[in-house]
Image (cartoon, helix red, strand yellow):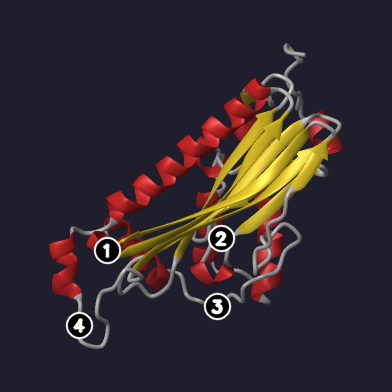
Amino acid sequence: MKKTLVYLFALILFPVSFAIAQQPYQLKYPYKYAEKQLNAGLKLTPKFRENIVNEYFYTAKIHYPLLQSENAQQAKVFNDKIEKTLTTIVNGFKNDLARPKDLLKLQSQDAPLSAGSNSLDVNYDAFYVKNKDILSIRFLVSVFYYRSAHPLSYFFTLNYDLNNQQFLKLADLLPEHYLSILQSIVRPVLIKDITRVNGQRLSPFQLKAIQDGTQAKPINYRNWNLTPNGLLINFDPYQVGAYALGPRYVLINYAKLKSIGFKLPETTKK
């Protein structure tokens, strides 16, 4: 509930002057899921689960991938992490819900509470970098709280090194001062992108939103994916502008990454 109030306050602060922009790396709705053969012995399988909890008046619909591999341990490390990630997402949603008796005080005749009054929707897409044997997952989490103006969305990303059977950290792939480097690359791209979407020069307040959301802090660059075309940085709605702007994305190609010292870990497992 506290998060809801914060986001509603932010909506007031950021004038809704942007149209929602379509970008190459935006998740396409309606979301479509199909089994994906990564290579001869590796397959990514879509799964779905639904949970209705009447006590807390919520419905959770969760799409997620599981890995099937000839290497059982390789699949287990990935699938265990997926399950832990989903638990984190669901628990975060439940913790933000008001207690049932408080929700009951809020309901009205025109908006009675039901199992769908609060909702959690989890969708995903996947990138497979074949020549580097990296499997990258991007979850898009959408939550709706009773009487909110609109859903709230955020990303949750995972990057799995299939050879080493470990999840990658961005800090391990770039030089020590990587946050400052990323800020210098990403910020001007977003300013240009959002100016284009806005159709006019950005206000000082809008510029500050971009500056705050791209500061050289780990939290601002926590949602990243390795794709066949490079490093994709995902920005949540509200992170660099108004809610209506939607999420934003910046792709840094591998040639540029190499020039700033990007390097994957050496293979330690066969």
Q: Amino acid at mark 1?
A: Asn
Vertical placement of 199 versus 89: above or below? below
Secondary structure beneath disc 3?
Answer: loop
Label 2, on which residue? 207
Which numbered disc, 1 or 2, marks the residue closer to the eye?
A: 1
Earlier-in-chain disc, 1 versus 2: 1
> Does residue 102 appear left or right of residue 248 in this picture?
left
Label 4, on which residue? 108
Residue drawn at x 49%, y 38% is 83
Label 3, on which residue? 17
Q: Amino acid at mark 4?
A: Ser
- Measured Cα–Cα span from mark 1 to mark 2: 43 Å
Residue drawn at x 70%, y 63% is 193
- Measured Cα–Cα span from mark 4 to mark 1: 17 Å
Earlier-in-chain disc, 4 versus 3: 3
Earlier-in-chain disc, 4 versus 1: 1
Earlier-in-chain disc, 2 versus 3: 3
Q: Is residue 185 visible?
A: no
Label 1, on which residue? 54
Earlier-in-chain disc, 2 versus 4: 4
Q: Quadrant of residue 265?
A: top right
- Measured Cα–Cα span from mark 3 to mark 1: 38 Å
Between residue 236 and residue 111, name the one nearer to us: 111
Q: Position of residue 60 (x, y in %)?
A: 42, 59
> Does residue 237 appear left or right of residue 231 in this picture?
left
Q: Amino acid at mark 3?
A: Ser
**Quadrant location of the N terminus?**
bottom left
- Measured Cα–Cα span from mark 2 to mark 3: 14 Å
**Quadrant location of the C terminus?**
top right
Secondary structure beneath disc 1?
Answer: helix
Which numbered disc, 4 or 1, marks the residue closer to the eye?
A: 1
